[in-house]
Image: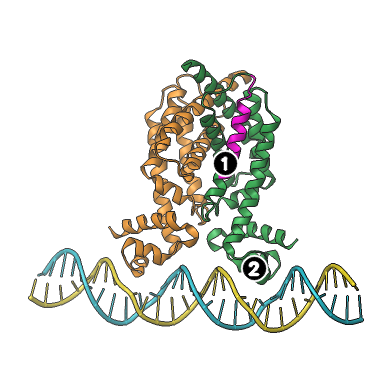
Chain colours: A orange, B green, C cyan, D yellow
Amino acid sequence: MTVDAIFEATIQVLLSHGSMRLNTTRVALRAGVSVGTLYQYFPNKQALLFAVLERHLEMIVSAVEVACHDHHGVGTEAMAEAVVKAYLQAKAKQSDVSSALNLIAVELDARNLIEAANQRGEEAIAAMLSTASDGRPGDLQVVAQTLLAAIYGTVRTFYERGSPPAAGDKVEKQLTVMCRAYLSASRREERAQA
Amino acid sequence: MTVDAIFEATIQVLLSHGSMRLNTTRVALRAGVSVGTLYQYFPNKQALLFAVLERHLEMIVSAVEVACHDHHGVGTEAMAEAVVKAYLQAKAKQSDVSSALNLIAVELDARNLIEAANQRGEEAIAAMLSTASDGRPGDLQVVAQTLLAAIYGTVRTFYERGSPPAAGDKVEKQLTVMCRAYLSASRREERAQA
DNA sequence: AGAATATATGAAGTTTTCTTCAAATTTGGA
DNA sequence: TCCAAATTTGAAGAAAACTTCATATATTCT
C-alpha cells in the first residue's frame, strides 16, 4: 500500500539523513511517489512523523503486555526473563525502526504518546509481579518503572550504537542476569524492611 | 562570554522547540546577540551543535573516570554505588542539557564522538572492576559495557520523561540496587562456570 | 587622544523546505 | 466500452532557514 511505502521511506530517510535533514520531498522520492501523494495521506510533515511513531510504540507495548499476561503466576526470575525477551524480540523485529524513531520522539508533542505507552508497559509488569509465586517485590510501582526503564534504556543504547545483531544474544543474556538479580534484590530488601 | 551565552541558548532552544525547529536566528536571539555574531564563532549550524555536544560528553565521561579512579580496590558493591552516583550527579548538574542533547546526538556525524566517550567510560569501569577486593566479575568487557549502558539508558529514560528532580533519589536507590545485584550475579556466574 | 585591532550588527541574497492545486492517470462498476 | 470516483502527479507559490559582508561599535595599546 502507498501509506506503508511512505512509512517505510520515512524510516529510511530518518536513518540515512537524520531528522534534521528529513523533508517531505526526500521521503516521497524514497517511497517512489510524488510529494502530492504524501500530502494526500498526511496533512503535514509533523502528522507523518507522529503516525510513524505511534505505529511503532503500539507494536512494542503490546508485545510487552502479551508477554506479561502469559507469565502471570510464575517466579520472578522467569518473569524477568520473559519481559527481557519480549522487549528485545519486538525491537529486533524492526531494529532499524527503533533507532530511527528515537530521533523524532521528543521533537513532536509526543510526550503523551510515549507516556501512555510506558504506562501500559509498567502496569502490565506490575500486574505480573504481583502474582509472583516466590513473593512480590517491594514497591511494585517503583520496581516496575525501574525495570522497564532499565530494559528500555539499555536496549536503546545498544541499538543506537549500531551493535551487530549478533551482539543481541549477549545483550539478552546480560540483561536477563541483571533483571533477575534486581528482582531478587528487591524482594530481599522488602523482607529486610518488613 | 559570548560563546557561553550561545551554548546556553542552544540548549534552551533545543528544549523549547526541539532540534527540528532549532535555527540559528532563534539561537542568536535567545543568546541576546545577532546572527552574525554566532557565525563569528561557529562556521555553521552543524559546527555549533557539534561543539555543544562535545562539551557535554566530556563533562560526563570525565566524571565517571574520576569516580572509577577514586574507587580502585574496593568491593564491587561500593563500585556499583560509586559509578551510579557519579553518573547521576554529573547528569543532574545539567539535567536540562542532558535531555536536550540526546535530540541532536545522532543527527550529526557524532557517532565517533559518542563512541569515544563510551569507550573511555567502559575502560574506566573495567579497570576499576579488575581491582575488586571481592573478586572480579567474568567477562570484564561485557560487564562494563552492560553496566554503563544500563545506567546511561535508565537515567536517560527518566530524564526524557521529565521526572521531577525529587524522583532522582528514588532512581539512584533503585539503580544502585540493580547494579549491585548485577555485579554480584556476574561474579556468581563466573564462579559457576569455572 | 588617536590609531589599530577585535568584536558585533542585521539587512539581504541564496538555498532549502513546506504545502497547494489544477490537471493527468488509474480504478472499478454499470 | 464508458463514465464517475479515487488516486496520483509535480510545477509553483509561500514560508522558513542558512549564511555573508559592508558597516558600526567597542576594546586595547601607544
Majority secondary structure of the magenta segment? helix
A184 up-or-down from A86: above or below: above
How packed is label 2: few (under 14 Cα within 10 Å), some, or many (20 or more)? some
In which quadrant of the rendered view does residue B125 lie? top right
Left or right position of A5 against B133: left
**Observer able to see residue B165:** no
Chain at numbered mark 1: B
Q: Position of residue B58 (x, y in %)?
A: 65, 46
From the viewer's perspective, is residue B43 above or below residue A154?
below
* Residue at x 55%, y 63% (from the top left corner): B21
For the record, the magenta segment spans: B116-133
Residue B61 x %, y %: 64, 42
According to the image, label 1 marks what residue? Answer: B118
Name the amino acid type tagged 1.
Answer: Asn
The first of marks 1 and 2 along the sequence is 2
Amino acid carrying mark 2 in the image: Tyr
For the N terminus of chain A, give its image quadrant. Answer: bottom left
Report which quarter residue B175 is drawn in: top right
Secondary structure of the residue carrying numbered label 2: helix
Residue A46 position in % (x across, y down): 46, 61
As for residue B118 lying within the magenta part, the answer is yes
| Residues marked 1 and 2 touching at CB (< 8 Å) | no
The quarter of the picture where the C terminus of chain A appears is top right
In the rendered view, tell whether residue B109 sits above or below residue A37.
Answer: above
Question: In the image, residue A104 lies at what x, y percent?
Answer: 48, 54
How far apart in space, not on screen, are marks 1 and 2 (Cα)?
31 Å
Q: Chain of mark 2?
A: B
A43 within the magenta span: no
Q: Residue at x 53, y 29 (%)?
A: B143
Circle 2 sits on which residue?
A: B39
SS under mark 1: helix
